[in-house]
Image: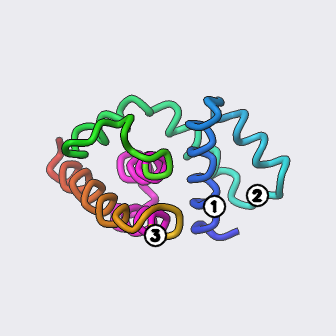
């Protein structure tokens, strides 16, 4: 399983956590029971990391999603943003630009036609804020 495939599975897991109101560990166990996962460390790190840092991640979404309340965002877009923001803020082995590009690609594949631009803009603002050390 490539990192891209693992990232897509992580996105699906984050989406399930939101929809089903389940803990990351339960979602990980469910995903593992459905298929063998090669990059299990990445999947566990991301799902547990998003769960453990959800307040920080969601504050970033609120801060940079002008005129949009978190509750109004589609659950798909929210899952994509949570994944990419986690990678930008907490995954030193993932370059920020890769996290942004992969988030945009997920939006192209899973969301509506306006989402890639919205997600790209929001993630780029978070990247810039991080670079400025805020």
Crowd tier of the residue under label 2, counting other residues whose Cα lies within 10 Å: few below 14, some 14–19, many 20 or above: some
Residue shown at 83% from the left, 57% from the top:
35
Give the Cα distance between marks 2 and 3. 24 Å
Q: x, y (%) of residue 37?
A: 76, 58
Tell me the mark number nearer the camera, choosing from 3 and 1: 3
Left or right of 121? Residue 9 is right
Instruction: Identify the secondary structure beneath mark 1.
Output: helix
Residue shown at 65% from the left, 30% from the top:
22
Q: Which residue is mark 1?
A: 6
Q: Was residue 86 drawn as part of the magenta stretch in this picture?
A: yes
- Give the color scheme: rainbow, by chain, secondary structure or one colour: rainbow
Which quadrant is the C terminus positioned in? top left
Placement of 55 over or under 60, stated as above or below: above
Residue shown at 19% from the left, 55% from the top:
128
Q: Which residue is mark 2?
A: 37
Give the Cα distance between marks 3 and 1. 17 Å
Q: Which residue is mark 3?
A: 108
The magenta stretch is 78-107
Name the magenta segment's main secondary structure.
helix
Which quadrant is the N terminus positioned in? bottom right
Q: x, y (%) of residue 30?
A: 78, 42
Q: Quadrant of residue 14?
A: top right
Placement of 57 over or under 115, stated as above or below: above
Tags 1 and 2 touching, CB below 8 Å: yes
């Amino acid at each position: 399983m490539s990192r891209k495939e693992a990232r897509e599975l992580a996105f699906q897991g984050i989406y399930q956590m939101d929809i089903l109101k389940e803990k990351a560990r339960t979602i990980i166990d469910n995903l593992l029971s459905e298929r063998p996962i090669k990059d299990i460390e990445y999947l566990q790190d991301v799902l547990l990391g998003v769960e453990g840092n959800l307040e920080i991640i969601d504050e970033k979404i609120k801060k940079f999603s002008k005129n949009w309340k978190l509750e109004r965002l589609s659950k798909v877009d929210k899952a994509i943003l949570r994944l990419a923001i986690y990678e930008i803020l907490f995954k030193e082995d993932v370059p920020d630009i890769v996290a942004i590009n992969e988030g945009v690609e997920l939006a192209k594949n899973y969301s509506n036609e306006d989402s890639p631009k919205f997600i790209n803009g929001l993630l780029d603002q978070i990247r810039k804020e991080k670079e400025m050390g805020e």
